Image (cartoon, helix red, strand yellow):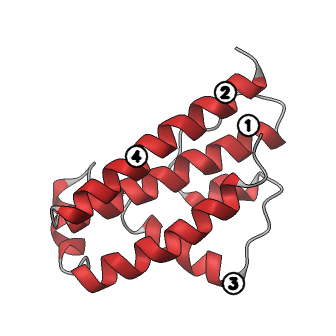
Amino acid sequence: MTKHDHILHWKVTAEDDWLASQDLLQTKRYLQCLFLAHLTIEKLCKAHWVKDNVDDHPPRIHNLARLLAATAVVLTPAQEVIIAELNGFQMDGRYPDYQRSVYKIATEAYTRQLLHDTELFRQCLLSPLP
């Protein structure tokens, strides 16, 4: 696979996860929705990581800030807040005890606002990718 193929893989799978997050929003599964929103941004961060590094295989980590630290992406203060909020939802699908602790945060209003902000950030991440 070429570097472009690797980037395309991350973009395509990110789009699938984004669409699934929208479906979960409609069915009021807010925690799972935010988990997939995080995964969407994670995959776009990994596309940037591949674009900006020699290796085609990004590290197997989930922390958005750590992934972006090794890229040319420059975050605005508002985007740093979005990343911090999304990072809180990276764990829910992996550890059930953590899921219980963040479940109360994921209200409909909170989820809709974070998804709105995530969509704007998603577009910013997509625009410079090939």
Q: Which residue is mark 4?
A: 17
Q: Earlier in the sequence, mark 2 or mark 1?
A: 2
Q: In the figure, 55 relative to 22: above or below?
A: above
Q: Earlier in the sequence, mark 3 or mark 1?
A: 1
Q: Which residue is mark 2?
A: 6
- Categorize mark 1 by other alpha carbons within 10 Å: few (<14), some (14-19), many (20+): many
Amino acid carrying label 4: it is: Asp
Q: Quadrant of residue 64?
A: bottom right
Amino acid carrying label 3: it is: Pro
Amino acid carrying label 2: it is: His
Do labels 4 and 2 touch, CB within 8 Å?
no
Residue at 82 percent across and 38 percent down: it is: 53
Amino acid carrying label 1: it is: Val
- Residue 33 image position (x, y, % from top left): 29, 60
Q: In the figure, 108 relative to 15: above or below?
A: below
31 left or right of 4 in image: left
Do labels 2 and 1 touch, CB within 8 Å?
yes
Q: Which residue is mark 3?
A: 77
Q: Quadrant of the N terminus?
A: top right
At mark 4, the secondary structure is helix
Q: Which mark, residue 50? A: 1
Q: CA distance from mark 2 to mark 1?
A: 7 Å
Give the mark toward the camera: 4 or 3: 4
Q: CA distance from mark 4 to mark 2?
A: 17 Å
